[in-house]
Amino acid sequence: MIERDGHVLAAQRPAHKHLALKWEFPGGKVEPDETPEAAIIREIKEELGCNVIVTRALPRFTHAYAVLIEMIPFVCHLAPGSPEPRPLEHIALQWVTPAELPALDLAAADLPVLNSYR
């Protein structure tokens, strides 16, 4: 989750991908020999073209889609001098307050992230 001025960034998945048009907190897979913190910094750069600083970890958990995935969520802030996030792999981005997040059609694996964030 990327925080800024009391808001968090939500990203909408493309229609042609798994979980089409669902909203999510950007992130991705940890590569071999990569720390989870390094992975989120890399994934945010690839997906949004911006730079983040990890401020804290949220509890890890697993979620079952067609396969079992381990979620390793972090709260981040934009790094000083970072470009604004751009939807390089998503169709839309939206800064929302935590209270507004439940109104979005969040991907199921992101619901526990929201709950632990609150």
Image: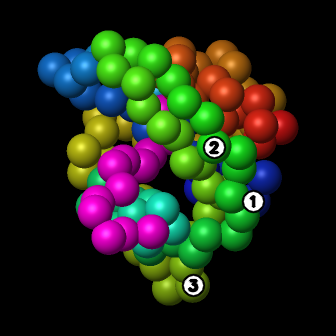
User: What is the x, y in percent for residue 36?
Assistant: 48, 62
Residue 60: name its quadrant.
top right
Q: Quadrant of the C terminus?
A: top right
- Amino acid type at circle 2 is Arg
State the residue in front, 1 or 10.
Answer: 1
- Amino acid type at circle 3 is Pro
Residue 66: name its quadrant.
top left
User: What span is in magenta?
Assistant: 24-35
Label 3, label 1: how many angstroms apart (C-alpha)?
14 Å
Residue at image x 77%, y 37%? 116
**Upstream in the sequence, badge 2 or badge 3?**
2
Residue at image x 75%, y 59%? 5
Q: Is residue 19 visible?
A: no
User: What is the x, y in percent for residue 61?
Assistant: 61, 35
Residue denoted by label 3:
80
Residue denoted by label 1:
5
Residue at image x 63%, y 24%? 111
Dot 1 crowding, Cα within 10 Å, few <14, some 14–19, many 20+: few
State the residue in front, 79 or 40.
Answer: 40
- Amino acid type at circle 1 is Asp
Say if 49 sits above or below 102 in the image.
below
**Upstream in the sequence, badge 3 or badge 1?**
1
Residue denoted by label 2:
60
